[in-house]
Image (cartoon, rainbow, N blue to C red):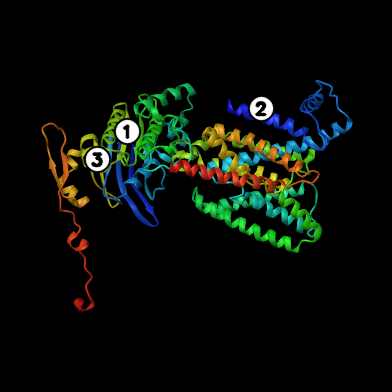
Amino acid sequence: MAIWALLVALVMSMLVAAGIGAVELDWVKVASLVTERVGIYEADASLVERSVFWVIRAPRILLAVLVGGALGLSGAALQGIFRNPLADPGLIGVSSGAALCVVGAIVFGAALSLPVSPWFIPLAAFVGAILATVCVLQLATRGSRVDVATMLLAGIAINALAGAFIGFATYIADDAQLRSLTMWSLGSLGGAGWREVGLIALFTIPGAAMILRQQRALDLLLLGEREAGHLGIDVTRTRRIIIAACALMVGVGVGFTGIIGFVGLVVPHVLRLAGGAAHRWVLPGSLLGGAILLLAADTLARTIAAPAELPIGVLTSLVGAPFFLALLLGQRRRAIA
Amino acid sequence: MTSRMEAKRVAVERGGVRVLDAVDCELHAGELLAVIGPNGAGKSTFLGAMAGDLPLAEGEVLLDGVALARHSSSELAKKRAVLPQQSSLDFPLTVEEVITLGRTPHGTPLATDRTITAHLLKMLALEPLATRPYPRCSGGEQRRTQLGRVLAQLMPLGDEAKFLLLDEPTASLDPARALELLEIARKLTERGVGVMAILHDPNLVSGMADRVLVLERGKMAALGAPREVLTKELFADVFDLHVERLEHENLDYPVFVPLKGTTPMDFEHRLFFTPTTREERK
C-alpha cells in the first residue's frame, strides 16, 4: 500500500541523509552503525565516523523527521477542521503566537531574570502556541459552534500583532540578542542534540497519536459541522483535541527550529492530489511525507553551500511557494478544461 | 406504542424574533409527512428543530417519548438521518467514500459497509461515478450522493423504527428524479421509516404524502391528509396563489394547476412603473 511505500521512502532517505556531509558514509555503513547499537552486528567504522554519526547526524535527522512530521500532520488536521485546504499552522496564528513568546523570551528573558535553559525557549513557544490558539478559539466561538471565518480573521490579527511585537523586540534588541533572534527566525535544525530530540519526541508522539485517532471524525467534518453532528460526532470535542494537539506539536517545533513554512500546506495538498482526501490516507501520509520533505530540505540546506548552512525556513519557502503556485495553476486549468 | 417523533408546542427564536411558534406535530414510523409553506414560513427552521440542531425557545422535541437532548448523539445517529438543503464539500472524497461515511454511527464490519454502499450506488444509478471525486460531480449527482449517504445511515431497515428528515430533497432534481426520490421515500416508509420532507410541488405532496403540515409565518396553518388539507382556499390564503383543483379518472389523488394572471402583485404597476414628477404629485 501507498503508506508502506512512504514509510520505506522515509527510512531510505534517513539512511541516505545520514551519509551525506563533510564526512561521507555509505548507507551500508550507516545501517551497520545503527544495528551495532542494538548489538546485532559490529560496524567497521572509525572513531570520527562514529562520532559524526551519533553526535551530529543522527539527532539532526531525527529532529527533522519529528518536526517535519508534526508540521505535515498538523497542516492536514487543521485543513480538515477548517474545511479549507489552504489552512496552515501559520495561517491561524499558532506559529506566530509561538514565535511571539520566543522572541519575548530571547529579548526580555535576561532582563526579567527568567531561568535561561535549553528547555526555556521551547516552553515559551508552547505557551505562545496555546495562548494564541485559545485566544483565537475564544474569539471565534459562538455558543457551541466555532465560526470559521472569524477564526481565520482572528488568526490574521494575531499574526499582525506578533509581527509588530517581533519588530519592536528586534528594534530594542542588543547585538547578541539580534543575532540569536535572526538565526532563530530563519529556522535551523543545526542545534540538534539528543536532549532536544527527546524533548520534541515527548510532545510530538502523543500529539500525533491524538490526531491519528481522529481520522473518521475528520472525514465527517469535511461533510460539514451539522452533518458530522447528525452522524454522531461530538464536533466541539474533536476540534478541541485537534487544536490542542497541533499547538503542542507546532509550538514545540517552532521553539527549537524557528518558523518553517509551507510543509503543512504543500504535503497534504500533494497527498490529496495523489490519493484522494480520505484521512486514513492523508493523515499518516502527511506525517511521513512531512518528515521526508523536511529531511530532504535540511540535508540540502546543510550541504548546498557547505561549510556554510542555509536557513531551512528560507529553503522550504523558496521551494514550497512556487510549487504551491504551480499546483494552484494546474488545478485551475483542470477546472476550466 | 408505535415509534414516533413529536414536536410539542415548539418555538424557535432568531435574534429575538419568533420564527417558529407553537408547532405541534408528530412524525410516525412508516409515514411520509410533507411540510409545505411559502418562502420564509419556517419550514427549514422546523426541520432544524426536529433534527435537534436549534435551541428551542419553548416546547420540546421527543423521540420515542424522550427529549432529543437526552439521547446521546451516537445513539440518535443510529435512529435518524438528516439530509440538509445544501452541503458543501470541496475536498476530493469520492462518491463511494461519501456514501460510506453514512455508516459511521454503526461501527459495522467493513465488508457490511461495502455491501450496503454497493447496493446504494446501484439503486441511485451512481455506479459509474463511484470513484469520481465529489466536487467534480454535477449538482444533481451531488444531491443523489448525499441522499445515498443518509440512506446508508438508515441501513439496515426493518429491525427498529427510524426517521429521515429531508430538507427540500427535490431541489435541483429534474421531474423524473424528483418523483424517483419520493418513490424511494415511499419504499422507506413501507420498511418502517418515518420520513419528513419539505416540498414545494403540490402535486408531489398530493400524490405521495400520507399527511401534510402547512406552515405560515412560523405557525401551523393546517395538518392532515393532503386530500382534505390541500384546497383552493388554502392555496389562496396561505400561498396567495389561485389554483384549480382537478380530479382525473386515472388518478386517485387531486392535482393542482396554478391559474394565470391571479398573483397578488400588481404587475401593471410594477412593470410599467413611471416615476411621477413633483408637479403631478401636488
Query: In this view, which residue lies farthest toward the right?
Result: A47
* Disc number placed over residue B194 in the picture, else none: 1
Q: Chain of mark 1?
A: B
Q: Secondary structure at mark 1?
A: strand
Residue on which the image places disc 3: B212
Q: Is residue B266 visible?
A: no
**Which residue is painted at 30% across and 30% down in the image?**
B184
Give the alpha-carbon distance from disc 2 to disc 3, as whole Å. 61 Å
Q: Is residue B220 above or below residue A43?
A: below
Which quarter of the rendering shows the C terminus of chain A? top left
Camera-nearest label, 2 or 3? 2
The amino acid marked with disc number 3 is Val
Q: Is residue B222 left or right of residue B188?
A: left
Where is residue A1? Give x, y as percent. Answer: 58, 25
Query: Based on the displayed image, in which of its 4 quarters is residue A189 positioned?
Result: top right
Task: Kindly identify which chain the residue marked by label 3 belongs to.
Answer: B
| Label placed on residue A8 | 2
Q: Residue at x 13, y 31 (%)?
A: B250
Along the viewing direction, whichever of A73 and A270 lies nearer the viewer = A270
Find numbered disc 3 in the image and state the secondary structure of the residue it sits on.
strand
**As shown in the figure, which amino acid type bears the numbered disc 1?**
Gly
